[in-house]
Image: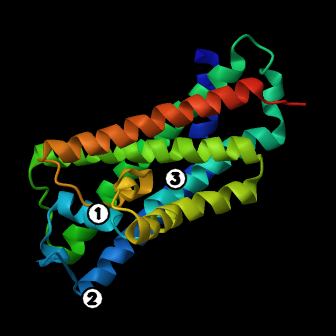
Amino acid sequence: MINLFKMDLHRFKNNRIMYLLLFIYAAFQIFGIFMMSQYPVEQGGIPVSAMNASEFIQSVLSQTPSWVLMYVAVFSVYFYMSEYNTGFYKNYISMKNARMYSVLSKILILGLFVLLMLTTMVIADLIGRSIFFGNTAIGDVGFFIKLLVGQFLLHWAFSIVVLCIAMITKNLIASLVIGLVLGLNVPGMIVGAVESLISDLNVSSYLLVNTITSIKDLNNMGDVIHVAGVAVIFILLFSFIAVRYKLKEDLK
């Protein structure tokens, strides 16, 4: 497990696509804040320029498409398919438990990327809000930390879902298209529309992307449990599916 993780970590640290994605995201995020300063908008009666960091992050993540999810989807697919297409996995796959460990290793690497992605988002937001809004307020520190932890778990879960899709399809284009469709929250919108027509259930609120794009009051224990529950269930479920699929996969 350790050796496989070291190999994936080496590929991760030397992955130019990762650094390019982070740079492009930061540049567009700062540019987006500049555009907000030129065309002031409000959300919930609060001007965007007056929001603290927690409010601003939730406002940005609630917009569809979620650009953070788009970048996470692209990296998740690229990182897996770059190894699969070169056939490098054949060098270690015969080792004992290598299939399971290779999946767990990639799940950990995706967690690192999501952490970098969210860190980049926070830094870019701080720079943009400081320059164009003159506002660097974070707000309640406890709320801010809960927000970041919750979003990290939710976005990590999303990356594992996309990894699972890439493993099953074994096709770069198909995996990217499905990942982008999920990032656009098309399934969530369809389920929500069906619910509004035929059911009083609220299943759609427990879907992963719907939870990511919903603004939550994390001072409310019910919302904290909702976010943590959805994230943990999706992480465990799709990690299990990915490992089971890899164990039974015909790699010839």
Residue type for callout 3: Val
Label total for image: 3
Identify the residue at the far right of this view: 252
* Of residues 124 and 42, the one drawn nearer to the viewer in this rendering: 42
Specify few, some or many for label 1: CA neighbours under 10 Å numbering under 14, 14-19, or 20 or more: many
Residue at 70% x, 41% y is 167
Residue 134 pos. (x, y %): 14, 72
Residue 22 pos. (x, y %): 48, 56
Residue 181 placement, left or right of 245: left
Residue type for callout 2: Gln
Q: Are marks 2 and 3 in contact (CB under 8 Å)?
A: no
Residue 222 pos. (x, y %): 18, 44
* Image disc number at residue 125: 1
Front of the two marks 2 and 3: 3
Identify the residue position indicated by label 3 in the image. Answer: 72
Residue type for callout 1: Asp
Instruction: Answer with mark 1 or mark 2, whichever residue precedes in sequence.
Output: 2
Disc 1 to disc 2, C-alpha distance: 16 Å
Instruction: Answer with mark 1 or mark 3, whichever residue precedes in sequence.
Output: 3
Residue at 57% x, 26% y is 104
Q: Can you tell which quarter of the image residue 80 is in?
A: top right
Disc 2 to disc 3, C-alpha distance: 29 Å
Residue at 44% x, 70% y is 193
Residue at 91% x, 31% y is 252
For the N terminus, the image quarter is: top right
Disc 1 to disc 3, C-alpha distance: 18 Å
Q: Is residue 111 above or below residue 42?
A: above
Identify the residue position indicated by label 2 in the image. Answer: 38
Secondary structure at badge 2 equals helix
Specify few, some or many for label 3: CA neighbours under 10 Å numbering under 14, 14-19, or 20 or more: many
Q: Is residue 250 above or below residue 68?
A: above
Q: Is residue 49 above or below residue 66?
A: below
